[in-house]
Image (cartoon, rainbow, N blue to C red):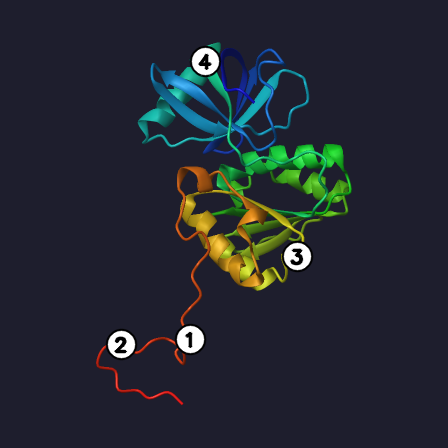
């Protein structure tokens, strides 16, 4: 799709947690068309554009949803909150991003998000369930604390409505209690470490990762020993923070690795 610049109406700004708020923008339906997984950019001031994942699939209603992490100490974050609260209209540039869900496919999905990376995953899930409600989907949502699961109710509703969808919440900070609730499976720790213990196979699975470069590549390295190939894993990180080599190099076998200078060891 061609990237377009347009003006959108700010319909609502809603706090979901003390740190995350949801924004609904309105525009002409044909002008805001996008693929699930793409992002837009908001103009904060001339020549300053900030990207945000579009947190909704295309449904023709002329609305865009954003999930924004608020960092009071960051100038751009404070400026954005001020604009969204006090201005009725904003300049928007969209769509961007190649980490999208193709139409007409049915492979199982492994969706891994950290924090507000859930916004991108939400759009992908909505599109997948609309096209094929029984598609096999596994969501792993990593957060620092339980309260950071700002859309937990929605995600649990997906799992309760669709038996082929499983929701895993990965809480990094140990909590006193993570109560048993229908539709959600709890894990404690860092998401890459939890995946290493829980994921057994990647056969036929398409993988989407939404988070920081450090989180994304940690997950890639964790999944690599299961036979991960570059073509089956997708993330915006691969475009703006590419890594060479993409997959971790295999560890050297001490029995076949070349001797270092002066090394006296003899191999059989």
Query: SS class of the residue under badge 3?
Result: loop
Residue 131 coordinates in the image, percent (x, y):
74, 33
- According to the picture, the residue beneath numbered tag 4 turns out to be 91
**What residue is at 51 percent from the left and 41 percent from the top?**
235
- In the picture, the quarter occupied by the N terminus is top right
Residue at image mark 1: 253
* 10 Å crowding of disc 3: few (<14), some (14-19), many (20+): few
x, y percent for residue 178? 59, 53
Q: Quadrant of the C terminus?
A: bottom left
What is the quadrant of residue 99 in the picture? top right
Is residue 60 visible to the viewer in this orientation of the structure? yes
Whether the residues at callouts 4 and 3 have beta carbons within 8 Å, the answer is no
Please tell me which of labels 2 and 1 falls first in the chain: 1
Give the foreground label among 3 and 1. 1
Q: What element carries label 4?
A: strand
- Of badges 4 and 3, the one in the foreground is 3
Query: Residue tagged by mark 2?
Result: 260
Residue 203's tag is 3
Could you tell me how far apart the alpha carbons at marks 1 and 4 are, in whole angstroms? 56 Å
In this rendering, position of residue 158 left or right of residue 81: right
- Give the mark, 3 or 1, whose residue is nearer the N terminus: 3
Camera-side residue of 229 and 211: 229
Task: From the viewer's side, name the closer residue of 225 and 82.
Answer: 225
* 3D distance between C-alphas at marks 3 and 1: 27 Å
Q: Can residue 190 be seen in this view?
A: no
**Label 2, label 1: how many angstroms apart (C-alpha)?**
14 Å
């Amino acid at each position: 799709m061609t990237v377009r610049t347009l003006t959108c109406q700010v319909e609502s700004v809603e706090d979901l947690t003390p740190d995350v708020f949801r924004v609904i923008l309105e525009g002409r339906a044909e002008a805001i068309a996008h693929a699930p997984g793409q992002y837009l950019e908001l103009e904060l001031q001339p020549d300053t554009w900030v990207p945000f994942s579009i947190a909704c699939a295309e449904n023709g209603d002329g609305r865009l949803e954003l999930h924004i992490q608020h960092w009071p100490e960051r100038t751009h974050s404070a400026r954005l909150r001020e604009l969204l609260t006090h201005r009725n209209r904003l300049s928007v540039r969209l769509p961007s991003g190649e980490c999208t869900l193709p139409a007409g496919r049915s492979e199982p999905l492994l969706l891994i998000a950290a924090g507000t990376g859930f916004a991108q995953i939400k759009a992908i899930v909505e599109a997948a369930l609309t096209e094929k409600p029984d598609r096999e989907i596994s969501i792993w949502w990593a957060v620092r604390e339980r309260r950071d699961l700002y859309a937990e109710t929605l995600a649990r509703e997906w799992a309760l409505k669709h038996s082929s969808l499983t929701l895993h919440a990965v809480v990094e900070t140990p909590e006193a209690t993570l109560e048993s609730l229908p539709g959600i499976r709890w894990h404690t720790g860092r998401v890459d470490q939890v995946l290493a213990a829980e994921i057994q196979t990647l056969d036929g699975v398409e993988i989407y990762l939404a988070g920081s470069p450090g989180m994304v590549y940690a997950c890639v390295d964790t999944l690599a020993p299961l036979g991960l190939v570059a073509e089956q894993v997708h993330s915006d990180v691969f475009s703006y923070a590419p890594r060479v080599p993409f997959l971790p190099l295999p560890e050297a076998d001490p029995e076949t690795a070349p001797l270092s200078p002066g090394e006296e060891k003899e191999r059989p």
